[in-house]
Image: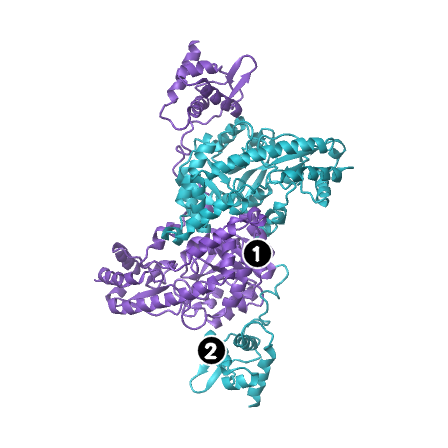
Chain colours: A purple, B cyan
């Protein structure tokens, strides 16, 4: 009797009336903890439920519910006619500590794998969202104020109000057939890409395209040509695929193909943004395009063509894509809707050469099954009903005006400090420090502007190695017109030496 | 003059009036092809636009548009006062063939990487969609006929009609904060998972969870314990991460931990589905749970707990999760909404131990930036407004009834052929061949049923190695009530020997 009472008291200690959840759950947790911490020994007899209930001042149903759960989980066992016991067959090796908040006792720095350490070293900014929508002058942010969200909401609702079984129950690893057809039509018309719907893979972004391409076509340690400077997200995704990066310089004709050949003739992949290189904004010249294709043909290497910013060209017509010049099926063409529509959509596409279509589908299925269906039917309608083309036209006009306005106002307010040159494409300009500022590191200028509440990443940060150009990246696409002049005045003050 | 005329004729050959696109585009393509194929040599003088137009019977504007484009792309160059020439600086190494449909000349089997060959060898069924919604008796297919799609469409439209800048312009690598909070609340209440919203990562599915976990915590060649038999998709995703699989048998208490320890004591990860093992449906016993946790603690290994089918338990209460027993932060808990809501949603979640939260966030950002935002705010509302809990209750009731009905009807129609035992959980039953059928390979039975238009995968297919149980997987969740009896009659006929 004393023993039973003792146990009742023991249990009661752990049940706080202020605890979380129903009383039976608290009682269950308290008894479980006592067993796991060996305060109740294997084979110990439990008090009868009515005794337990009386001791603890809870209803008998509450006690029974807790005991039932413990029995069903194997902590307690009932023997016919003789009551309830702590299970005998629990292993000795119970958790050393009482179960606490998962991981509260975990070591501060758990051991990651070597490749995992690389992944975990990805700079936070690459994925952090804070800086992304700060208006003046975060690069790479499109203007969404014109996006027809009311229409978009209607298309979403229309697609999902009475969805077909096909739409609900599964998906093709390459994406929704209607969307793939719409993307193929768009790419043929707008970009001269030679493709059929079967070659299209719907992906979550350029990073997933890089990840899939590198894993399918390259082994760990194989070399990839990467533009230097380049987008930090592209670099992170390539590094995550455990391949070796060969940095190839970019001049005013784009990637210096001859340097790539000199440094890594046997590279397996060249990753380029020929339409509008990020961050420099240069266009890969026709000569270099042909040179790159010739190298890939001879080296049996692949080219990942990131058709970055191709939609936003304000003067002249865009150059033909590498993909459309490729007669050997060595170009993997990728593009994203992040800028054209809005970033959080997370929809991109890859055009696989016909001989790789099946391999890409299978690889995608192994790694990520198939793309989320929620936006796909609505997007297919958005393309097919002409809303995409109309939106791109509106945006192109707006961005061209914003660039002209920025150039005009910068000429007035930043003369003698920063020089901006027009760019026939893209969503940002590179400002070059002149006069006394030319002697100051661009990272220091970025720091001064940051202190004044302005965002203008240093161009040198996109480089690897000692030879870096100096500049400030000014994204203008999403900056409301009324903010530009005050922001530039503030910038001039912050940079006054 | 003769030369100019000759060229005009040459060009005209390639311009077919039935060709695609506007005439200027066709003219552009024809001249470009002539240059790339060296039919027009570097430095050759081009005919004047009006001559070209007259020769070809097109308007002068058409000819000018084509020439302008070729000049802007660098194929042609203009010299002041002396007309237009084929560019001199094109490299000799032009594509060997005329640009054709991208890749039409590609080798039939391009060289993949070693790891890529593994990815591309993923069985098509793993990602193919055809079989997924075939009603009788594809396993793993939930019933969506009850899902409140009208409500879902409203929630989507509500979320996107006037979205905030935050929702549109970016995202947290771990997912939308409201959804993470809703998932954490749900997991604490429904599954006793010890977690805060900060530990939740929204992912596209179990495969992405496996991919991320393996790449973050394991290096190529490290060992992973995998249940044998197991889900083919889980196996594909683990294999894709270039780790070494140690197959560990499953008995009626679940994963035989002692065998895992004997085969690969230094494994870095154990991948288990303790709530309802797929395909066998067994529950990992408490003793084994504690044993597994003790091993992980001592080996400093990780446990990936796939809480498969935990929502669909019809008798007794579910066992506490491994995660809730884990005092050391060694359990990575994953679950999916594919069955609970509907598969094409492609939303899953991972609960990271606190010490790994930052590493998981960064790795996700490197590989895949952040999860697509379209469904996330609507899902957060679906959880928070109680629709999830209500839907799970309805489904649980329906599935329990369907299992009872299948057992009843199978007892009548399949007696002496297949034996079905009740399963307190899940969306499928394993039918065991008896009598004369017990001597026939289950794969042969599957083949016979397939010929009769019925789907019932062979249990042995989920195994690796010689020791395999024989059985047929019967998914019952999505089979309309009226179809069950005719399907079972058909099955009996198809299996009649």
Q: Residue furthest left?
A: A497
Which of B398/A491 is in front? B398
Q: Do the residues at discs 2 and 1 belong to one chain?
A: no
| Residue B300 versus residue A199 in the image, above or below | above
Q: In this orientation, does residue B373 appear?
A: no
Q: Which mark is residue A35?
A: none
Q: Nearer the viewer, residue B55 or A251?
A: B55
What residue is rendered at 33% in x and 62% in y? A474
Which-is-in-front pick, marks 2 and 1? 1
Q: CA separation, marks 2 and 1? A: 37 Å
Residue at horizontal 39 percent and vertical 54 percent from the top = B169
Dot 1: chain letter = A
- Is residue B167 positioned above or below B225 on the image? below
The quarter of the displayed image where residue A400 is located: bottom left
Image mark 2: chain: B
Instruction: State the SS at label 2.
Output: helix
Find disc 2 in the rendering and name its residue.
B68
Q: In what quadrant of the picture does the N terminus of chain B appear? A: bottom right
Label 2 neighbour load within 10 Å: few <14, some 14-19, many 20+: some
Residue appearing at x 51%, y 34% in the figure: B393
Q: Residue most toward the right?
A: B497
**Side (left or right) of A119 relative to A494:** right
The answer to which of B309 and B243 lies nearer the viewer is B309
- Nearest the viewer among B177 and B157 is B157
Residue B328 percent coordinates (x, y): 43, 32
Circle 1 is placed at which residue position?
A177
């Amino acid at each position: 009797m004393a023993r039973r009472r003792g146990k009742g008291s023991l249990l009661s200690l752990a049940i706080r009336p202020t605890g979380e959840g129903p009383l039976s759950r608290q009682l269950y947790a308290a008894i479980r903890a006592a067993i796991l911490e060996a305060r109740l020994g294997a084979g110990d007899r439990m008090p009868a439920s009515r005794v337990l209930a009386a001791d603890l001042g809870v209803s008998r149903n509450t006690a029974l519910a807790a005991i039932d759960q413990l029995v069903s989980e194997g902590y307690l066992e009932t023997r016919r006619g003789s009551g309830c016991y702590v299970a005998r067959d629990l292993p000795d090796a119970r958790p050393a500590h009482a179960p606490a908040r998962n991981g509260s006792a975990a070591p501060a720095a758990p051991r990651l794998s070597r490749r995992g350490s690389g992944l975990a070293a990805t700079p936070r900014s690459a994925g952090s969202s804070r800086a992304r929508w700060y208006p003046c002058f975060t690069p790479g942010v499109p203007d969404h104020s014109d996006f027809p969200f009311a229409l978009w909401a209607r298309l979403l609702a229309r697609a999902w109000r009475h969805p077909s079984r096909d739409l609900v129950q599964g998906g093709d690893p390459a994406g929704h057939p209607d969307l793939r057809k719409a993307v193929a039509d768009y790419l043929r018309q707008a970009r001269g890409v030679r493709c059929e719907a079967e070659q299209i893979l719907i992906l979550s972004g350029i990073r997933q395209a890089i990840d899939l391409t590198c894993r399918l076509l390259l082994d760990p340690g194989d070399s990839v040509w990467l533009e230097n400077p380049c987008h930090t997200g592209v670099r992170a995704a390539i590094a995550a695929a455990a391949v070796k990066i060969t940095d190839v310089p970019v001049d005013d004709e784009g990637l210096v193909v001859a340097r790539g050949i000199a440094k890594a003739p046997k590279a397996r992949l060249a990753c380029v943004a020929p339409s509008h290189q990020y961050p420099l904004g240069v266009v890969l010249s026709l000569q270099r395009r042909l040179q790159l294709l010739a190298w890939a043909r001879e080296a049996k290497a692949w080219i990942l063509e990131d058709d970055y910013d191709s939609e936003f060209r304000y003067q002249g017509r865009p150059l033909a894509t590498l993909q459309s010049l490729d007669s050997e099926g060595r170009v993997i063409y990728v593009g994203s809707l992040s800028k054209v529509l809005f970033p959080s959509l997370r929809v991109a596409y890859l055009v696989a050469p016909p001989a790789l279509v099946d391999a890409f589908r299978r690889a995608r299925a192994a790694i990520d099954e198939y793309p989320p269906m929620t936006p796909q039917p609505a997007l297919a309608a958005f393309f097919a009903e002409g809303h995409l083309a109309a939106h791109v036209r509106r945006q192109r006009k707006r961005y061209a005006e914003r660039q002209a306005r920025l150039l005009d106002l910068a000429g007035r307010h930043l003369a003698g400090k920063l020089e901006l040159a027009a760019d026939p494409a893209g969503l940002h300009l590179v400002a070059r420090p002149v006069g006394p500022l030319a002697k100051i590191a661009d990272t220091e200028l970025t720091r001064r502007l940051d202190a004044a509440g302005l965002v203008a990443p240093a161009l040198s940060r996109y480089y690897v190695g000692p030879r870096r150009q100096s500049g400030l990246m000014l994204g203008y696409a999403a900056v409301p017109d009324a903010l530009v002049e005050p922001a530039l005045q503030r910038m001039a003050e912050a940079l006054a030496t």
